[in-house]
Image: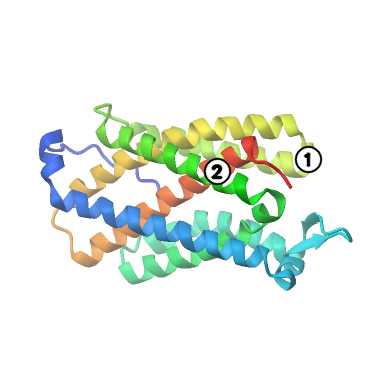
Amino acid sequence: MNDLDTDYVSMPSAEAQARDMGLRNFLLGIYQKMALGLVLTGATSWAVANTEPLVRLLYNVTADGRIAGYTVLGYVFAFAPLGLSFASGMFMNRLNAAISGAFYWVFVAILGVSLSSIFLLYTGISIANIFFITAATFGVVSIIGYTTKVNMTGWGGFMYTAVLGIIIASLANAFLFKSGIMQMAISAIGVLLFSALIAYQTQSLKHMYYSVGQASQNHRAALTYIGALTLYVSFINLFMSLLSLFGGRR
């Protein structure tokens, strides 16, 4: 995933930022693309989970209709988002709006297929409740990141290393330890980490805006896709951590 950590730039006062329509439009474009990505992911997940032939292509289903693991194709889609996250820099760093946009929409659609299992494992009302809790948490920590005067520029390396640690721990637990307690601990740490990461990323997006100066329209459009993808991934990870902790299973 793209690291938004940039060299600290001198930014205008909070009052000047509030009047900066360019900054406002830049962030609005990011949040709009992120929101549309979440809609596409949710719609794709729901559609796959409610299409029996697709469910049987992706999951091993028992005689009584329970999910008993992934098929080979299911594993491909389960791990595809992780692989795409690490490869995202090859596409996003070109700063071409068409390439960045294509990668973003393909990514959110594939993740939608990957997340279809949540509709098979958790109740619909539980998924909806956790989603709104995640959205509220995202809004609060994003506002904190936007308004805080604390310079979080140097936090990126530590946070992304911690994210990598969570990924490794999650994989180890899924395939080796299979511990419910360990999974709860990973999810609890994930809630704290991804909340902090969203605040850091929001502040970094402001630094990005002011650091590029008079960039071309195509360049700025590509940057909005980079910002949208970054916040989108953190939102999904926060959502999954909360769902793992508090979701009501079928």
Does label 2 or label 1 sit earlier along the sequence?
A: 2
Rendered location of residue 130, percent (x, y): 55, 42
Structural distance between the alpha carbons of marks 2 and 1: 31 Å
Rendered location of residue 243, percent (x, y): 60, 41
Q: Which of marks 2 and 1 is in front?
A: 2
Colour scheme employed for the rendering of this structure: rainbow
For residue 176, the mark is 1
Between 162 and 202, the one lying in front of the other is 202
Which residue in the structure is indicated by mark 2? 129
Between 81 and 46, the one lying in front of the other is 46
Can residue 1 be seen by looking at this rendering? no
Identify the image quadrant of residue 140: top left
Q: Is residue 174 left or right of residue 146?
A: right
- Could you tell me which secondary element the residue under label 2 belongs to? helix
Rendered location of residue 166, percent (x, y): 59, 37
Q: What residue type is labelled 1?
A: Leu
Can residue 245 be seen by looking at this rendering? yes
Residue at the spot 51% in from the left edge and 55% down from the top edge: 85
Q: What residue type is labelled 2?
A: Asn
Residue at the spot 78% in from the left edge and 40% down from the top edge: 176
Rendered location of residue 8, percent (x, y): 24, 37
**How many residues crowd mark 1 within 10 Å: few (<14), some (14–19), many (20+)?**
few
- Could you tell me which secondary element the residue under label 1 belongs to? helix
Between 21 and 89, the one lying in front of the other is 21
